[in-house]
Amino acid sequence: MKTADSQRPRPGSDILRTALRRNIGAMAGGTVLMGLYQAGETAFPIALGLIVEHTMQDRSPGALALSIGVLAVIITTVSLSWRFGMRVLQKANTTEAHRWRVRVADCGLEPVARDAGLKTGEVLTIATEDADQTADIIEVVPLLISSLVAVLVAAVALGLADIRLGLLVIVGTALILSVLSVMSRRIGSSTREQQARVARAGAKVADLITGLRPLHGFGGNHAAFRSYRRVSTEAKHQAITVAGVNGAYAGTATALNAALAAAVTLTAGWLAFDGRINVGELVMAVGLAQFIMEPLKLFSDMPKYVMTARASAERMALVLVAPPVAAHGAERPAAGGDLEIDCVRYGALRALKFQVPAGEFVAIAAYQPRAAADLAAILAVRVPPHEYEGAVRVGGEELAALSVEAVREHMLVNPYDGEIFAGTLRTNIDPSGTSRTVAEAVEASLLTDVVALHREGLDHGVRDRGANLSGGQRQRLSLARALAADSDILVLHDPTTAVDAVTEQLVARNIAKLRRGRTTIVITSSPALLDAADRVLVLDDGVITAEDTHRNLLAADAEYGLAVAR
């Protein structure tokens, strides 16, 4: 039987119910404490009225001292119940927001992408802002109940003085909530649209930052900035709309609450003037009329917060319930197995067919960059098996029958634009902290000069996306990470495009030496890497057109020489 944590929530309402059910204990304790706070706040004007009435009758120091003691107890109760009640609720709120952030992040990091139709920036917004706003429901419900307690206590106290005052509070509260519940629906729809537009703007700026360097290269940065400005302007206009709706809601709530308080005060004054309530009851009624505005405001704000939480929960559901892009099997490939591409058709690939036996170092010279990218995407399991024709076999097993986790443990595909993360050189090379070949990988990738430059060595800090490293240093750091993984099959896509020719020669020899006896495939046009390989496959127009050693191909194929010459 699955636990609440492992069950996959469906729509936004299910997410809210899960959050409420998971925090029922904290919410119960918080509700009791916040109810005590609101009851104490309500008791203050009631106590003042009683004190005025009895003090005027008794006119004794003892009665005055007792009154002061009662007020001290009420004030202490109000202070402590608020302090500990909010502590309990905010801890539960923060913990619940953390749980949903982890759930959304877990979905984003799954080996098989989900078909949510959202960009990375949008998922990031959902994992932060929407998770926080969804968790706010943990505080909303106890505050709603405690505010209701305060209104009911005030209505009962006023009703004991005169039934018309109690009925006025109950009827007025019902009318206020009816009006505001209608307005809150507009807030929910406007907030959903605002969150979607803000998420799109976030996704746009994330894409812009990622592609800033190439955009500058061909002068497309200004067009990209204009595109972001347009998306951001749309988000701004929607935010203004939401602010206007919220302002209208808040103004209406304040006006209605003030009208009810004024009606209670005027009615109490009329009853006192008519002799139907005494001076103490008048003081109590006036005090409650002023006090009741706070719980009424809190009570009337709750529909807005509920709609906002629900809108955020529905956006989280877009990620959490999205089906995986592809369904893979549960088998594991045989250790040290070979790799076979059998008549694969996808993108620029046309009936591509070749085989790499276990332990061989093969280079693939792709004349068209698109074909190289498509091949790397298929091997990295970024393309679902049903989207291409033919078969990819790892250790004799078809890729579709293998679990993605097992494939990636067995076969690592390192892209030419491998991401560099904020942290240290060491954590970028060995994120899990389990590799036994970090030193060998650093030496093979010639990252030793970068390590030697800094007193901290491998513990030297690296900024986000490797901002404090050069292009060649980032590429060698990414290569070191791939080599340190020590996988059975390693696929490298253009691993030396950002380094000089001398470094490239040394790196090529080091890769061949370090990976001796392990299956290695390099998709490249680098003469150094092609020469270091046991065999070169020429990929032209989507098919393998030739295969031999690099030097034999140079001697026999003029087109090959032109394609790889530098």
Image (spheres, grey):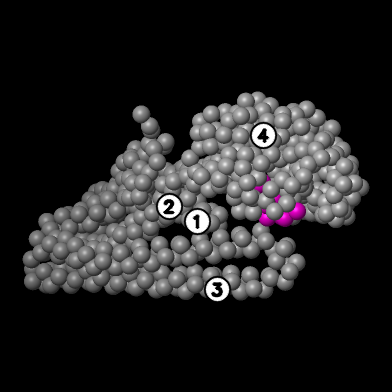
Work out whether 101 lies above or below 245. Answer: above
Q: Dot 4: few (<14), some (14–19), or many (≥20) neighbours within 10 Å?
A: many
Name the residue tied to disc 2. 318
Contact between marks 1 and 2 (CB within 8 A): the answer is yes
Q: Would residue 523 be found to the left or right of residue 93 on screen?
A: right
Name the residue tied to disc 1. 118
Q: CA distance from mark 1 to mark 2?
A: 9 Å
Work out whether 202 lies above or below 555. Answer: below
Q: Earlier in the sequence, mark 3 or mark 1?
A: 1
Work out whether 443 lies above or below 260. Answer: above
Q: Nearer the viewer, residue 341 or 515?
A: 341
Name the residue tied to disc 4. 339
Amino acid, disc 3: Arg
Work out whether 295 lies above or below 375. Answer: below
Q: Which residues lie in the magenta part? A: 367-376
Which picture quadrant has residue 211? bottom right
Residue 17 lies in the magenta stretch: no
Which picture quadrant has residue 44? bottom left
Give the image location of residue 150, x and y in percent.
25, 54
Give the image location of residue 386, x and y in percent.
51, 45
Amino acid, disc 4: Leu
Name the magenta segment's main secondary structure. Answer: helix
Work out which quarter of the rendered image holds the N terminus and state it: top left
